[in-house]
């Protein structure tokens, strides 16, 4: 019986979200499916999408807040301000 991890290739872990390869230290494992890993960048993106989905089921105010937050994050990333030492690395939740 083989127990080869389908997400692991040559010592690198395949992100089950974006499909790119990462070292084990850069991947978070899913609790119920430890063979599945998601890279840190995708966990941030997934969290943002989850927040927006939750806001959709709530009132107009929550949807508006989610949209403003997303636009602010996109603006920061677009201008690469997250790479500036004064602001620091992206740690957007
Ligand atoms: Zn990923």
Image (spheres, grey):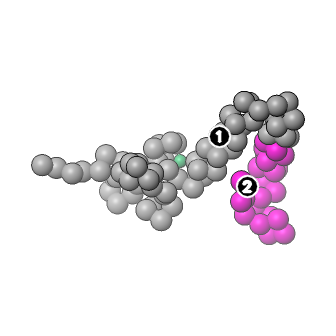
Residue 63 sits inside the magenta stretch:
no
User: Eyeballing the image, is 19 above or below 29?
Assistant: above
Q: Is residue 64 visible?
A: no
Q: On residue 92, which mark appears?
A: 2
Instruction: Specify whether 15 is left or right of 53.
Output: left
Q: Residues within 10 Å of mark 1 (few under 14, many from 20)?
A: few
Percent of width and height locating residue 24:
43, 62
Ligand 1 within 8 Å of disc 2? The answer is: no
Q: Of marks 2 and 1, which one's residue comes earlier in the chain?
A: 1
In front of the other: label 2 or label 1? 1
Ligand 1 within 8 Å of disc 1? The answer is: no
Instruction: Specify whether 92 is left or right of 75.
Output: left
Q: On residue 5, which mark appears?
A: none
Secondary structure under tag 1 reads helix
Secondary structure under tag 2 reads loop
Q: Is residue 52 visible?
A: yes
**Residue pushed farthest bottom?**
85
- Residue at the image position 38 percent from the left and 48 percent from the top: 33
* Residue pointed to by mark 1: 50
- Residue at the image position 58 percent from the left and 48 percent from the top: 42
Percent of width and height locating residue 47:
64, 46
Residue 85 sits inside the magenta stretch:
yes
- Residue at the image position 80 percent from the left and 69 percent from the top: 85
Instruction: Specify whether 16 is left or right of 44.
Output: left
Query: Which residues are the magenta region?
Result: 69-93
Percent of width and height locating residue 71:
82, 40
Q: Residues within 10 Å of mark 2 (few under 14, many from 20)?
A: few
Percent of width and height locating residue 54:
70, 36
Mark pair 2, 1: CA separation: 14 Å
């Amino acid at each position: 019986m083989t127990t080869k991890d389908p997400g692991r290739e040559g010592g690198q872990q395949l992100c089950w979200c974006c499909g790119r390869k990462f070292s084990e230290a850069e991947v978070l494992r899913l609790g119920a499916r430890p063979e599945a890993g998601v890279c840190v960048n995708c966990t941030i993106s997934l969290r943002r999408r989850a927040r927006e989905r939750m806001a959709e089921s709530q009132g107009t105010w929550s949807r508006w807040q989610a949209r403003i937050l997303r636009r602010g994050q996109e603006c920061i990333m677009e201008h690469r301000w997250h790479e500036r030492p004064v602001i620091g690395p992206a740690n957007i939740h």
